Structures are given as structure tokens and as C-alpha cells.
Amino acid sequence: RRVVVLISGNGSNLQALIDEQHHDRLGGEIVAVISNQPDAHGLKRARDAGIDAVALPHREYDSREAYDGALIKVIERHEPDLVVLAGFMRILTPRFVQRFLGRLINIHPSLLPAYQGLNTHARALADGVAEHGCSVHFVTEELDGGPVLLQAVVEVAEGETEESLKEKVHAREHLIYPIAVKWCLEGRLQFADDGARFDGTPL
Ligand code: GRF
């Protein structure tokens, strides 16, 4: 099974997926990594792992539609079964989402549906929540609003800072994203109109 990963930056989640693949535990192969930021560190991680690393700078396109059209072409060249957003910091057009609906997933640093959008850790801290975390979800046209398929919870400690919370959540992201990718590739998790469906086989 073939996976394409989209990134914009550091790519630590990408690295977690690469590490899993190296242990033959991903259930598929990352065939390409694409970044809208040409200097993203994640592209180096991909190259170091022998994975096709593609820079597709959004600045070279006049509109979101034009960019996403080009992105669709590059992705489809790699014939993916699953498209994985791992810190891809762009809002996708409906056309893009429709094209990959059901095989497009994202990881978001909050317990969705809480804290959609940016600055999730600061907002959670400001609200004084006891628990925070991260979510893997299918991408739909509603930003950070698609069906959730896996979450990890962290406790917010006393004296927690935005930085420490972010680090804790990040560590959990690296644990759950490879699991979610594997389950999608195995067909155990599927997109349904009314949510994510788990096929019920024992974990
Ligand atoms: C993560 O916090 C993820 O939840 C969000 O973007 C960040 C990407 O981090 N969508 P990295 O590039 O994988 O280190």
C-alpha cells in the first residue's frame, strides 16, 4: 500500500512514520513526501530515508485553486492509497478534499472537536482544562471538523507551560499517527458519512 505525506516544516510526525516503516510496522510504504515550503526540514528527513522528496512552493501559483490543482497532479503521479497531512500548514480547496475524500487524514494538536484551528495549546491552558491531547481525523471540507479516528490524552500538570504542553502532546502524536496510518492502510478504519468506522477486529 502506498502513502504520500504532505508537510510544511520540521516533520517530526513524518519521522515517526518513517521509523515505523523501517521496522516494517507501517503496513505500507511512504512513496513521496511533498512540501509547500522548499526549505522544510522534513524534506531532508525524507531524502535521508531514501524517499522521493518534492518541493512544491505555493508562492509560484496565483491562486489556491491553481496550487491545489498542481498538488493533485504531483500526488496522483505516486498513486497513493492514503494521503497523510503531517504539519501541512495550508487550507485545502474543496476540489482537493473531494478528490482524496476517505483516504486523506490529518493530525491536530487538540482533543477535537475542542480547539480547532491554531494556537491550541495556549488556548487550552488559558481555559484551565485538566486534559488536552491530539486527534487524527479524516479530512473533510470543514476545517479540523472531519470524523476523528484516534486520540491521545495528556494531563495538564500544575505549572504547565505552553512549551511543556506542546512537547507532551507532540510525543503522543508520534505514538498515535503511525497506528492510525496502519489501520487505514489495513482497511480497519474507514471513512463513512456519519463518522469513522472501525471494523471491529480485536486490537
Ligand atoms: C503537529 O503539532 C501537528 O499536530 C500539526 O502540525 C505539527 C507538525 O509538527 N498539524 P511536525 O512537523 O510533525 O514536527
Image (cartoon, rainbow, N blue to C red):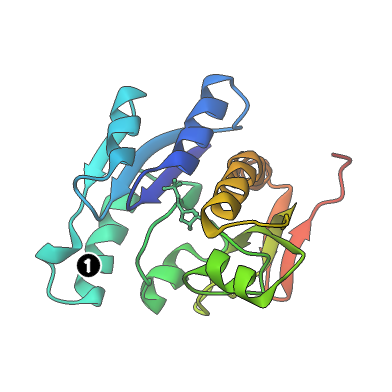
State the count of labels: 1
Is 48 or 187 nearer to us in this picture? 48
Q: Is residue 68 above or below residue 76?
A: below
Residue 20 picture location, percent across and down:
57, 28
Q: Residues within 10 Å of mark 1 (few under 14, many from 20)?
A: many
Q: Residue 138: horizontal and vertical position, in percent?
A: 59, 63
Q: Is residue 51 left or right of residue 147?
A: left
**Label 1 amino acid?**
Tyr
Residue 183 placement (x, y as % from top left): 68, 44
Is residue 106 in view?
no
Looking at the picture, tell me which residue is in the foreground, 104 or 44.
Answer: 44
User: Where residue 123 sits in the image (x, y, percent)?
Assistant: 57, 73
Quarter of the image for residue 162 reads bottom right
Q: Is residue 201 above or below residue 50?
A: below
Is residue 137 visible in the rendered structure shown here?
yes
Left or right, residue 166 beside residue 45: right
Residue under numbered circle 1: 67
Taking the spot 33% from the left edge, 40% from the top edge, the residue there is: 42
Image quarter for residue 160?
bottom right
**Residue found 84% across the figure and 39% down from its top:** 203
Q: Residue at x 27, y 51 (%)?
A: 74
User: Residue furthest toward the top?
Assistant: 23
Q: Is 27 placed left or right of 14 in the picture?
A: right
- Vertical order, 177 against 63 (above or below): above
